[in-house]
Amino acid sequence: MKGTIAEVSEIVAMRRRDFIAGASMMFLGTRLAGASPLQSQTAPKGPELSEELSAAEVEIVNRSVMAKEVADFFGKGHSCAEAGLAVALRFLKKPQDLVWAAGGFGGGLYNGDLCGFVTAGAMAIGIYAGTLEVEKMAAKEICVQKTREFWQWWTSTAPLHCAQIREGRKDLKVCDRLGKLAAAKVEDLIKPA
């Protein structure tokens, strides 16, 4: 590209504006069409969801400090994401005001998108990895490995999106069940070895 710095800057600025305008129109178009750019239109629904814990799940929840505590937060002034992060912060002995990091993630980013318990689990794993007394790259690798394990567990347990989880339901029973199970799984991933 030849030209003066001013000419090159003008071309770059124009391209950035075009990009921003185009991206904005794509986002608006998907919202008007009822879709989210974060949701995959071909995402599988996942397994059938029960609203009640099975006998095996009750045992898992009863062994988990975090799973038992999630009911103290979820639906009591805290969204799913806030509840999931709040119990992890308590477990990790971190300041509870950090729960605000999850403030915008409840109810699938308040748009029925990625479940707040999924996002809270990823945040909790990240906070845990940040507390490890290892080199940054080693902590990052641990974070990636544990986040992938959590993701794989979740996708074998439930759909990723709030709208699919809550589809046809008027209450939060299924969310309560998934919150307890997610908290137990996260605890298993972040507890000291």
Image (cartoon, rainbow, N blue to C red):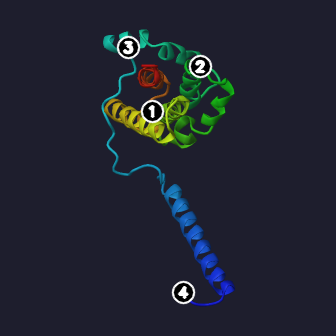
Under mark 1, the amino acid is: Arg
Question: Of the residues tagged 4 and 2, which is closer to the observer?
Answer: 4
> Residue under circle 1?
166
Q: Is 95 left or right of 62, judged from the image as shown?
A: right
Q: Position of residue 30 (x, y in %)?
A: 49, 58
User: Dots 1 and 2: beta carbons under 8 Å?
Assistant: no
Looking at the image, which residue is at 59% across and 24% down?
Answer: 89
In the rendered image, the quadrant that contains the N terminus is bottom right
Q: Earlier in the sequence, mark 1 or mark 3?
A: 3
Q: CA distance from mark 1 to mark 2?
A: 27 Å
Q: CA distance from mark 3 to mark 2?
A: 19 Å
- Are there few (<14), some (14-19), or many (20+) residues within 10 Å of tag 1? some
- Are there few (<14), some (14-19), or many (20+) residues within 10 Å of tag 4? few
The dot on residue 90 is 2
User: Dots 4 and 3: beta carbons under 8 Å?
Assistant: no
> Residue under circle 3?
60
User: Dots 1 and 3: beta carbons under 8 Å?
Assistant: no
Q: Position of residue 105 (x, y in %)?
A: 57, 38
Looking at the image, which residue is at 53% across and 59% down?
Answer: 27
Under mark 4, the amino acid is: Met
Q: Earlier in the sequence, mark 4 or mark 3?
A: 4
Under mark 3, the amino acid is: Ile
Q: Earlier in the sequence, mark 4 or mark 2?
A: 4
Looking at the image, which residue is at 58% across and 15% down?
Answer: 72
Q: Is residue 136 above or below residue 88?
A: below
Q: Earlier in the sequence, mark 4 or mark 1?
A: 4
